[in-house]
Every structure is written in structure tokens, then in C-alpha cells.
Image (cartoon, grey):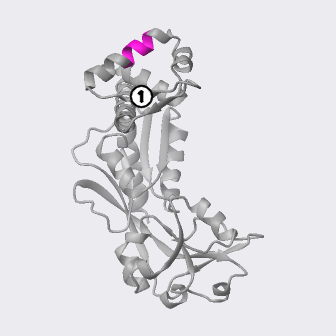
């Protein structure tokens, strides 16, 4: 199985058309069709569903799995090639960081800006997402670092503890009944429509705090991006449980934030694969971040 064939496959799935993929790759349609047919024969599985009417290309179940793995392989190869090309050019190249949504990213951005002022050929790529998804990509070598929130298992990683905490609270409209309170207790939310992050539903500290099984709560929606959750709150879908400082509620905002009581806090760590070979840019970033953390 050759890398170029994976790239052909990904181009076809992106364009949903062999002809469009061929034009994008500057190849002929028969060339791509033959390569993809050979790929399916090699795997012994059908990956693509060829449309008849509109000629759009779909994916079988095996095709969807193969697309995910092909994307990971191509990304890892590209990342490795870039690191090798930059290895003889001093401190330069790409640094990939997976992170949940947190205001603590400011310290990473501050260090990144300082590095780029000194070494403009260093480029940072910050990817936000679900914690488990981010750690999976870290394990596969697609990220250099992951920003781990809470008490997740960091035993298989090297890590640097960050000297800050996030606090959970409730985002709601200013005209909501609970907006009159200084803080929110578990009992306040037992009969209210809630909007929870996908991770919070299973977060032990939240389940202990709320004192109710999730099956007895009125969960009206879930989210994985704070901004989308804020729109749901603004449209009166419910009360959003999220971390502080993620949504600006000052000025003319319809929304306000109230902390939980008792308080739920999250510690955070920057983690990286143990024994992983880092690029010079990644090593320098870690050195600079350590220096900044030492000043807190």
C-alpha cells in the first residue's frame, strides 16, 4: 500500500467525485479509478460506493474506518517530513498542541508569541476537541503535546503541571431566574433544563457535586464547543455548565456566569509521550514554558 494511493483515496472522499479528485490532483480519471480498485482488491473490502445518478462517491462502513486511518497516516508522514526538512535549520518548524477549551491556553499563547518573535519560522497548530480524541492523536504521534484538564490519567506521559485552575459554573441569560443568585447549588439545577459538555456527563466530580444520577436530570442538549453552547443558552434552551472565562459576558451580552457552590475546580497538565523524539521547535517551546511556569 503506497502513500500516494492513500492521498488519491482521501482526495476522492473529500471531493465525493473521481473526476473532481482527478482534476485536483492533475491526473486522469482512469488512473485514479484503477488505483482505487487495486486498493480495494488488496484489502479484500469494498471502500467506495459509486453513485449512478449524480456520480457522487460514498463510503462503506469499512471505507469510513479506512478514511480515518488514512488521514492519520498521511498527517503523520507529512509531520515527519517537515521535521526532517527543518532539522538542519536551527529552531524552526511546526509545534502541534491538542487542548480542551480553557483560559489557561493564554500562557501557551504567550510563550508561543515570544518564540515566534525570536524565531519566526516556528509555527504553532492548536487543535481543540474532546479530551479522549486529543489523547488518541497524541498517542499516534500527531500532536507534540496535549493540554490535559482535570484528573485524567497522565501516568503514561511525561508532564508539566500548570499553576492555574479552571472553575465550573453556569452560563445563562441575565433574565433567567437563577441569574439573581451569586452562586449555583446542586438543588438549583435539579428541575432545570441543562446543557452539558459530553465529558461532564461522565465527570466524577460533577456527578458527586450534583447529587443526582444523570438519568434524573433534565439534559436538554450536549455540546463540545463553548461558543455553540452559549448560543443555545442565549436562545433559552437551558442552563450551560461550563468553565469560567470561556465566554465574554461583559457589556451588552444577554448572558451571565455564576460559579458553582461548592466549587468544582480542574487542575491542568501539559503532557507529551514518554521517550518521544521532539523536534527542536517543540523542545524549545517546552523549555520556554518551563521557564515561564517557574516565575508563577
- Which quadrant of the figure contains the N terminus? top left
| Residue 86: % across, % down | 39, 26
Question: Would residue 247 be visible to someone looking at this image?
Answer: no
| Residue 188: % across, % down | 54, 89
- Left/right of residue 112 with respect to residue 86 in the rendered view: right
- Left/right of residue 271 with respect to residue 94 in the rendered view: left
Residue holding disc 1: 48
- Which quadrant of the figure contains the C terminus? bottom left
From the image, give the main secondary structure of the stretch colored magenta.
helix
> Which residues are the magenta region?
31-36
Residue lying farthest to the front in this orientation? 53
Instruction: Indicate the quadrant where residue 295 lies.
Output: bottom left
| Residue 160: % across, % down | 33, 58
| Residue drawn where x is 55% and y is 17% of the image | 19
Q: Relative to 59, is 221 above or below?
A: below
Question: Would residue 14 be visible to someone looking at this image?
Answer: yes
- Left/right of residue 131 with respect to residue 115 in the rendered view: left
| Residue drawn where x is 44% and y is 79% of the image | 264
Closer to the camera, 256 or 110? 256
Please check the rendered image and state whether residue 34 is part of the magenta-colored stretch, yes or no.
yes
Element under label 1?
A: strand
Q: Relative to 293, is 118 above or below?
A: above
> Count the marks: how many?
1
| Residue 31: % across, % down | 43, 10
Q: Relative to 57, is 204 above or below?
A: below
Q: Relative to 110, is 229 above or below?
A: below
| Residue drawn where x is 36% and y is 25% of the image | 81
Please check the rendered image and state whether residue 1 is part of the magenta-colored stretch, yes or no.
no
Instruction: Indicate the quadrant where residue 158 lies.
Output: bottom left
Closer to the camera, 59 or 83? 59
Closer to the camera, 192 or 81? 192
Amino acid at each position: 500500500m503506497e502513500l500516494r494511493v492513500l492521498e488519491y483515496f482521501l482526495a476522492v472522499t473529500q471531493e465525493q467525485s473521481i473526476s473532481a479528485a482527478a482534476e485536483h490532483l492533475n491526473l486522469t480519471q482512469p488512473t485514479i479509478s484503477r488505483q482505487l480498485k487495486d486498493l480495494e482488491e488488496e484489502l479484500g473490502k469494498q471502500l467506495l460506493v459509486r453513485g449512478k445518478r449524480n456520480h457522487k462517491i460514498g463510503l462503506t462502513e469499512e471505507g469510513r474506518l479506512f478514511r480515518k486511518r488514512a488521514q492519520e497516516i498521511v498527517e503523520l508522514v507529512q509531520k515527519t517530513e517537515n521535521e526532517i526538512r527543518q532539522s538542519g535549520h536551527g529552531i524552526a518548524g511546526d509545534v502541534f498542541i491538542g487542548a480542551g477549551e480553557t483560559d489557561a491556553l493564554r500562557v501557551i499563547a504567550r510563550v508561543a508569541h515570544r518564540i515566534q518573535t525570536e524565531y519566526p519560522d516556528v509555527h504553532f497548530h492548536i487543535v481543540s476537541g474532546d479530551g479522549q480524541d486529543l489523547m488518541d492523536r497524541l498517542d499516534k504521534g500527531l500532536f507534540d503535546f496535549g493540554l490535559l484538564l482535570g484528573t485524567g490519567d497522565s501516568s503514561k506521559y511525561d508532564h508539566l503541571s500548570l499553576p492555574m485552575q479552571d472553575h465550573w459554573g453556569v452560563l445563562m441569560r441575565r433574565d433567567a431566574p437563577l441569574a439573581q443568585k451569586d452562586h449555583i447549588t446542586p438543588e438549583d439545577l435539579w428541575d432545570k433544563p441543562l446543557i452539558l459538555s459530553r465529558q461532564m456527563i461522565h465527570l466524577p466530580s460533577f456527578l458527586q457535586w450534583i447529587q443526582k444520577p444523570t438519568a434524573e436530570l433534565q439534559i436538554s442538549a450536549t455540546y463540545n464547543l463553548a461558543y455553540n453552547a452559549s448560543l443555545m443558552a442565549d436562545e433559552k434552551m437551558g442552563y450551560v455548565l461550563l468553565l469560567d472565562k470561556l465566554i465574554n459576558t461583559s457589556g451588552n451580552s444577554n448572558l451571565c456566569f455564576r460559579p458553582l457552590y461548592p466549587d468544582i475546580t480542574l487542575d491542568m497538565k501539559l503532557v507529551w509521550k514518554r521517550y518521544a523524539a521532539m523536534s527542536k521547535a517543540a523542545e524549545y517551546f517546552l523549555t520556554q514554558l518551563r521557564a515561564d511556569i517557574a516565575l508563577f
